[in-house]
Structure formats: structure tokens, C-alpha cells
Image (spheres, rainbow, N blue to C red):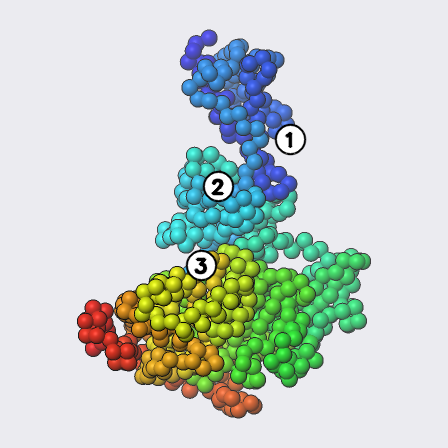
């Protein structure tokens, strides 16, 4: 036989072996079905196995058939369209006889897999202000995996179209956004989109090996294609990007409902549940927790107003609960809807005792363009100090096994890459209801621009329309709640590693509280102009965090300054968290510096003792002025701030009109706040924007006078700011 023919056959055989499709393991991993073993005689026996058949047939344009047999030697017979027959008998060359080593890996197990796909996103989740196609990658192993070694593509002809970024923790997930040509890899964006009529996705390694190919079928809007517990893909209406996949049929005892959950209509709606065989349904219409003593479903339910129906389904010893909200006679809305179901008696008690720490069981669901994206049972109580007694209360939602799931698993905030929450806040505006009703949410958004202020913790928000037991309660903001779990999720650590201290003396959580209170005593007793003292303090506190926090506070002219909160993560330095900003930005900034830094506060909270004494140190003063120069000429400049205000207002304007119409104009029953109407709100917004004109110059000038900053330092740092 000619040597060229022998090599051609060997190459064809290798291509056949490496091209075998991957099978799926029961845990969702992918197994290669090619096994290469070295036999005892020193020769190589090549066996190709398949879960369905023992023989591989290849059909191509020339209808070639390859048959492989082995009895200590390999016999390869190639037949071409009945014409030329080449018979080759001989021993396959061993690794030592070839330039390319034979892969001796047995059943290579793939740990990185495509887990979930969304090809038509019209109401599920936003990314950078847009709703785009999405792909979830899962790590099925028990170790962290660096995704830099992997590629994904929408075509098998270019499998290395997009290199993945980041690290997936053991058992974790990474979500990627298909935005097309403008993709930014640092934002987990991919340079292609997925056709809703069907597409092929390819996951491969950096050496060009294909891990798996997923053929995505045509999908309806907001419908996913996800891997189930058997490793097989199936269409699902239950989207769970960033968390474990769940299929609607996994809770088999929950009934089908008609019309669909989240339906908006007028007049009378008739709700029909279609129970599974052998199940019983008990329901409530007043928001209370459904029990076996509740009304039993035996006929359709008619409703004439917006209603949350909570159901309990039983099938033998198996139980499931769910809530469904139907919107009757509601006007069009631009924002998402949050629906709370709570018993009438519980709501009355909560309102009567707003400072009580008792939590009441509620259903908590959110709808995006009519599509419910989560539905959990959790505990709820009122939150806030002065504002807790207001008619328009704020609420804290706590997720725990006492009420239902231990965490809410959903990416609530589009600009925050966190999809698991221990608690959240529904904030009603508090004292800001008298002004512009946006400040506590707006300021963190301003500060996050450009990632310039990463030493001060800020919270994320989402504006929503709130319904409690079907009653519209106005425009609210879902907010992060600052606690050990929240900070741990931002830092990727255990919540036990987080210490939080409020008002500089009250330890809220963690084991390092005595370190801070001891430091506070040290600051009070020592002169921070002493280099050794300054070095000691700077080794324990992030001085950039101190500088940024108080620059922001004097720029805000916060007249409620004693709400100071500091935190420490593990062995890291202490840093500041910014919150409770209702009573800020009420003027043009006049006296902001004097109010915050004009005297050494030694009262109950000693809110400025650290920064006051640090500013006596020349080195810290230079740091403070350099940070002021950076922030005042970038994210806190009039142009930047007004642009963000306009964007923020545009997003809530449509629904704010209805909210103001519900609440104002009137005085709160407690006398603590006056609710404004929509026309007044619009005027306040324009007045609010005027407060930023010349603000940075005024605040910087006042600080210079207050602290006696030298002309040399003014020329060095503030010449662009002070006019």
C-alpha cells in the first residue's frame, strides 16, 4: 500500500474520532464519548463507543463508509461509491512512532456548560438600559473556573468569535448579554445576537476544541431555553438567569390559570384555575396567608378591581403556595409593578406599631411589562425613624426560611451584577416627599458615574409602582438594605467577615466593632498632626474613603449629618457607607462646609471628629483637596449632574403624575410631611436643577475660608473650580 494512502486513512480516522458528539451526564455535565486506551501488547486499540450504537457510519458527498474492526490489530476498509476499494491491514503507529501524541484522557468531563438562553427579551431584564438576548454559563464543578480559556459563538464556522471574561465560582453562574457590534467584554457583552427564529450556539476552549453545540429553537417572547436536571434542554417560561434553572412543571401541583397571571383588563375578570388531578386549592382575596381553612376553590372567581389572589395547593402531603395579581381598570404605566399580599389584620397592626421589629408574612412579586419575574413569600415590617409614622411608609422585606425562601434570587438592579438578596427596602420618599422625591436614589447614581468613588459604599435602586392587596400605593423605590449580607455580596465574602458600626459607637454586626470604638477613643485623645499617630490611623482607615465621604457631604449640605455608618471587611480598612439623603440639596450649597466641618463635634454621635482632626494634618489636607478637584471637575460638575437629573426624571415622570395625584396635595396625618401634587413637583424639579449652578465653586470657596487653606494649595488644586 502506498504510504500516502495510509496517512490519508489515519487522518480521516482521527477526524472522525475527535468529531464525535458529546453526551450529557445526569448532573448537566458533558462527556466526550471517545476513549483511547493502550492495550497490554503495546499496540494501540482504538474503540469508538456510542450510547445508541456500536458502529459509526459516515455519509458524505461520495458516500464513503468506514468500518473499524480490531483483534489485536486494526483493519480499516474504505469503500468509495462502489468503485475504488482500499484495504489496509497493519498496526496503528504508537505514540513513539508519530509526531503527534495520542490523547490518553479517558472520558474527559466538561465542567463549563451553556445553561440558559433567551433570544427574545421584551420584558424580562434590562442591561445598560436595553433589553437584549442573554446567555447563561454554568460551572458544574466544585472549584472556581477562569472563563478566559473559553469562547462562545453563534456559528460553528467561527467558534472562537467571543472570548469569555471573569471567573465562575464553584456551582455558580455567569450571565452574558448579546448586544452585537458594540459589545464591551468587560461588561459581559457578546458581539452577536440570537435569532428568535432559531440559532446555533457553540462553546469551545482556547485550543479550538468544541465543548458543546446547542441548537436553539424558535422561541416566543420572554421564553427561555434551559438545561434541566438531566442535562437536557427544554423550553421554559420560568427565566432564572444567574441562578439554578427551574421549570414551570417542576412545581407540578400548581394549577394552570386563565387569564394569565399579570393580565390587565377592565370591567369584570373571571379567573379560572385548572388543578392537577388529586389536588385541592384554597385561596384568599384579602392578601392573607392561605390555609386549609381558607375558601376552597370549586368555581371560577370573578373580580372587578385589581386583586392579588394567594393560593395554597395540596396534593396529599405535598403543598405549594403562589400569588397571582390581576390588574383591573389600571391606567398604562411605564414602570414595573410590585405587588404585596398581606392580611388585613397584619397590615393594620403594622401601621399601628410602625417601629415594631415584628415581621408579617407577605407575598412579594414583581411584574415587568406584565410578565411576573419573581414571586416569593417573605417577612415585612415598616422601616425608618421619623418617617416610619408617615401615611406613605417605607418597608423592609426580609427573606428567610421562617417565611419561605432564604434569599430572593433575581437580578433586581440592572446596574448591579448581584442576583441574590437577603433583604430589600421599599422606600416611599420619606421627608423628600415635600421636595423632589428623588434625592436618596439620585445621589448614588451620580456618584457611581465613572467609578471614581469606589471607597464609599452606595446603594442601588429600581423605581416601581407599588400595590398592597391590590390597592395602588404610588411610586416607590426598591432599594438595597445596608447590612452584613449586602456588603458581603458586594465584596464576594461571607457575611460573618463584615462589621458595621452606626453613629460611630453602635456595633450592628461583626466581630471588629471594638477595633473601631477603640480607634475613635484614640482619635479623641491624640493629635493627628503627629506623623506616628497619622500613620497609625491611616493603617486602619481608608483615608480616601474619609475624604470622599465628607467632600460629598459638604457638597450635599446634608442637614441630617449624624447618620454615619462605617464598615470593615475582613482585614481590610474601615470605609464609609452613604445613606439617608432625604434632607440634602435643599439650597445652593451655602454653609455646607460650615455645617459639617465648622466645629469639632463631641456630642452623642461625634459624627465629624475623625475628619475634623485629620484636616489639621497637611498630608491629609492635600489628599482632601486633590479629591475635591477630581470630583468637582467631573461627576459633581453642573453639566454632569443636571444631565443625570434629566435622565432620572424622564424615567419616572409618567408614573409620578399618578403617584402625586394619589398622595397630594395634603398634609400627612402625622403632621410630619406635606405631599405635593404633580404640577408642584415639576416646578420643584426645575428649582432643584438650578441649585447646581455654581455649586462647586461656592462650596470650595467656603471650605477654603473655613479651614484657612493657603493660596499655594488653592492655586495647586482649586484654580479651575473657584471663580
Along the polypeptide, which appears first: circle 2 or circle 3?
2
Is 133 rendered above or below residue 518?
above
Is 676 rendered above or below residue 48?
below
Q: Secondary structure beneath disc 1?
A: loop
User: Which residue does the image show at 74% across and 63% down from the upper left?
Assistant: 313
The residue nearer to you, when weighing 118 against 689, is 689
On residue 203, which mark appears? 2
Q: Are marks 1 and 3 in contact (CB under 8 Å)?
A: no
The residue nearer to you, when weighing 500 against 697, is 500
Q: Residues within 10 Å of mark 1 (few under 14, many from 20)?
A: few
User: Which residue does the image show at 62% across and 65% down from the upper left?
Assistant: 399
From where the camera sits, is residue 557 visible? no
Q: Residue beneath label 3, please?
A: 572
Along the polypeptide, which appears first: circle 2 or circle 1?
1
Compute the Cα span from label 2 to label 1: 24 Å
Compute the Cα span from label 2 to label 3: 38 Å
* Left or right of residue 584, residue 294 in this image: right
Along the polypeptide, which appears first: circle 1 or circle 3?
1
User: Which residue does the image show at 79% across and 68% down from the upper left?
Assistant: 292
Amino acid at each position: 500500500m502506498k504510504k500516502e494512502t495510509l496517512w490519508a486513512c489515519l487522518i480521516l480516522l482521527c477526524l472522525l474520532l475527535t468529531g464525535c458528539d458529546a453526551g450529557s451526564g445526569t448532573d448537566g455535565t458533558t462527556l466526550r464519548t471517545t476513549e483511547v486506551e493502550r492495550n497490554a501488547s503495546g499496540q494501540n486499540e482504538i474503540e469508538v463507543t456510542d450510547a445508541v450504537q456500536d458502529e459509526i457510519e459516515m455519509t458524505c458527498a461520495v458516500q464513503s463508509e468506514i468500518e473499524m474492526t480490531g483483534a489485536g490489530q486494526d483493519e480499516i476498509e474504505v469503500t468509495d461509491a462502489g468503485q475504488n476499494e482500499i484495504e489496509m491491514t497493519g498496526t496503528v503507529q504508537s505514540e513513539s512512532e508519530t509526531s503527534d501524541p495520542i490523547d490518553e484522557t479517558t472520558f474527559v468531563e466538561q465542567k463549563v456548560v451553556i445553561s440558559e438562553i433567551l433570544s427574545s427579551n421584551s420584558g424580562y431584564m434590562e442591561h445598560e438600559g436595553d433589553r437584549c438576548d442573554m446567555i447563561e454559563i454554568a460551572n458544574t464543578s466544585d472549584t472556581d473556573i477562569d472563563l478566559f480559556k473559553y469562547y462562545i459563538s453563534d456559528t460553528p464556522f467561527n467558534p472562537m468569535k467571543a472570548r469569555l471574561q471573569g471567573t465562575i465560582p464553584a456551582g455558580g453562574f455567569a450571565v452574558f448579554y448579546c448586544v452585537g457590534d458594540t459589545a464591551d467584554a468587560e461588561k459581559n457583552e457578546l458581539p452577536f445576537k440570537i435569532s428568535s427564529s432559531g440559532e446555533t450556539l457553540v462553546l469551545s476552549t482556547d485550543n479550538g476544541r468544541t465543548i458543546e453545540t446547542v441548537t436553539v429553537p424558535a422561541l416566543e417572547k420572554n421564553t427561555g431555553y434551559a438545561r434541566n436536571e438531566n442535562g437536557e434542554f427544554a423550553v421554559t417560561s420560568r427565566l432564572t438567569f444567574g441562578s439554578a434553572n427551574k421549570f414551570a412543571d417542576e412545581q407540578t401541583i400548581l394549577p394552570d390559570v386563565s387569564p394569565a397571571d399579570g393580565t390587565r383588563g377592565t370591567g369584570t375578570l373571571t379567573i379560572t384555575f385548572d388543578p392537577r388531578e388529586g389536588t385541592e386549592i384554597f385561596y384568599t382575596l384579602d392578601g392573607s396567608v392561605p390555609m386549609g381553612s381558607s375558601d376552597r376553590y370549586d368555581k371560577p372567581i370573578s373580580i372587578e378591581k385589581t386583586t392579588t389572589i394567594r393560593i395554597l395547593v395540596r396534593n396529599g402531603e405535598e403543598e405549594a403556595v403562589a400569588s397571582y395579581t390581576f390588574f383591573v381598570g389600571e391606567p398604562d404605566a411605564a414602570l414595573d409593578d410590585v405587588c404585596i399580599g398581606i392580611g388585613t389584620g397584619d397590615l393594620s397592626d403594622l401601621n399601628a406599631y410602625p417601629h415594631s421589629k415584628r415581621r408579617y408574612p407577605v407575598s412579594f412579586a414583581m411584574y415587568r411589562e406584565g410578565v411576573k419575574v419573581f414571586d416569593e413569600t417573605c417577612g415585612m415590617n415598616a422601616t425608618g425613624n421619623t418617617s416610619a409614622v408617615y401615611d406613605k411608609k417605607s418597608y423592609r422585606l426580609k427573606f428567610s426560611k421562617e417565611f419561605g425562601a432564604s434569599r430572593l434570587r433575581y437580578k433586581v438592579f440592572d446596574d448591579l451584577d448581584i442576583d441574590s438578596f437577603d433583604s430589600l427596602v421599599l422606600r416611599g420618599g420619606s421627608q423628600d416627599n415635600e421636595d423632589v422625591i428623588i434625592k436618596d436614589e439620585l445621589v448614588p447614581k451620580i456618584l457611581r458615574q465613572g467609578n471614581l468613588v469606589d471607597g464609599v459604599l452606595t446603594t442601588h435602586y429600581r423605581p416601581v409602582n407599588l400595590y398592597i392587596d391590590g390597592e395602588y400605593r404610588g411610586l416607590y423605590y426598591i432599594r438595597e438594605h445596608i447590612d452584613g449580607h449586602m456588603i458581603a455580596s458586594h465584596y464576594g465574602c461571607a457575611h460573618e467577615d463584615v462589621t458595621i458600626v452606626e453613629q460611630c459607637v453602635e456595633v450592628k454586626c461583626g466581630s471588629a466593632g471594638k477595633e473601631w470604638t477603640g480607634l475613635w477613643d484614640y482619635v479623641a485623645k491624640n493629635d493627628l498632626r503627629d506623623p506616628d499617630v497619622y500613620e497609625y490611623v491611616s493603617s486602619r482607615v481608608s483615608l480616601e474613603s474619609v475624604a470622599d465621604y465628607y467632600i460629598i457631604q459638604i457638597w450635599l449640605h446634608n442637614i441630617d449629618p449624624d447618620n454615619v455608618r462605617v464598615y470593615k471587611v475582613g482585614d481590610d480598612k474601615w470605609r464609609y457607607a452613604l445613606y439617608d439623603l432625604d434632607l440634602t440639596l435643599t439650597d445652593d450649597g451655602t454653609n455646607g462646609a460650615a455645617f459639617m466641618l465648622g466645629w469639632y463635634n463631641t456630642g452623642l454621635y461625634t459624627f465629624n471628629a475623625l475628619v475634623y482632626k485629620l484636616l489639621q494634618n497637611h498630608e491629609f489636607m492635600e489628599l482632601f483637596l486633590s479629591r475635591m478637584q477630581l470630583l468637582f471637575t467631573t461627576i459633581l460638575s453642573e453639566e454632569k449632574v443636571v444631565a443625570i437629573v434629566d435622565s432620572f426624571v424622564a424615567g419616572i415622570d409618567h408614573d409620578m403624575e399618578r403617584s402625586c395625584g394619589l398622595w397630594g396635595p395634603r398634609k400627612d396625618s402625622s403632621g410630619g410631611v406635606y405631599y405635593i401634587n404633580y404640577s408642584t413637583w415639576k416646578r420643584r424639579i426645575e428649582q432643584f436643577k438650578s441649585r447646581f449652578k455654581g455649586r462647586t465653586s461656592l462650596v470650595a470657596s467656603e471650605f477654603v475660608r473655613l479651614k484657612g487653606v493657603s493660596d499655594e494649595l488653592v492655586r495647586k488644586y482649586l484654580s479651575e473650580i473657584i471663580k
